[in-house]
Image (cartoon, helix red, strand yellow):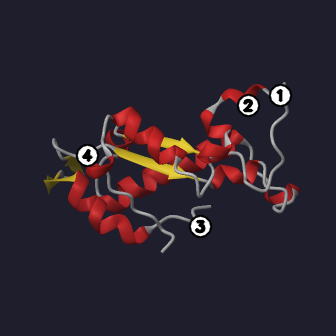
Amino acid sequence: AFQGYGSRAVPLLRQLLRAGGASDEGVAALRSDAPAIAFVSDQGHRCTDPTVGARGRLSEAAVRDVARKLVRRVANEVGVGAEALEGHVRWYHSFLSPAAPRLAESDPRRGRREWSREYARPSPGQLHHAMEDFGVPPAATLLVSYDD
């Protein structure tokens, strides 16, 4: 379910997020100066990609559930509390696959950013939205991608 998870980013995330000592359970607190974390994902393309087929198609709720599980996995691997990390992370999903037909004018999803072409890779809509939400200029933004 986490095919695109970049486990190579764990050491960097550990340095950015984990406070020095661990509690009795081996879980450290988040650093007080931990940066805001935005996860951008095109896993939602599995909702609309016509090449996936019915068996591989996911609902929007299923994609959001995968995201929640991924945050818990990252928290476990980084060694911080899952609840603390969940409150520190924002997700930016892209649901409209570039291969999917455009949404009909009457489709209620049409006005949502995450269902727009601007959110689908290689367009930078998700990253721009995250920088806007966090009030962070491009020069102070680090993008870590699993696509090398």
**Distance from label 1 to label 4 (Cα)?**
39 Å
Q: Which residue is mark 2?
A: 110
Residue 105 disc label: 1
Q: Residue at x 24, y 52 (%)?
A: 17
The answer to whether mark 3 and mark 1 are in CB contact below 8 A is no
Q: Is residue 84 left or right of residue 91?
A: left
Is the C-beta separation of discs 1 and 2 under 8 Å? yes
Separation of disc 3 and disc 2 at Cα?
28 Å
Q: Above or below — where is 31 with respect to 146?
A: above
For marks 3 and 4, give the CA distance.
25 Å
Label whose residue precedes the other's in the sequence (3 or 1): 3
Q: For the residue labelled by badge 3, is the local secondary structure a helix, a strand or a loop?
A: loop
Q: CA distance from mark 3 to mark 1?
A: 33 Å
Sequence-earlier tag: 4 or 2: 4
Where does residue 50 sit, x and y in percent of width and height?
Answer: 85, 56
Q: Name the residue type under label 1.
A: Glu
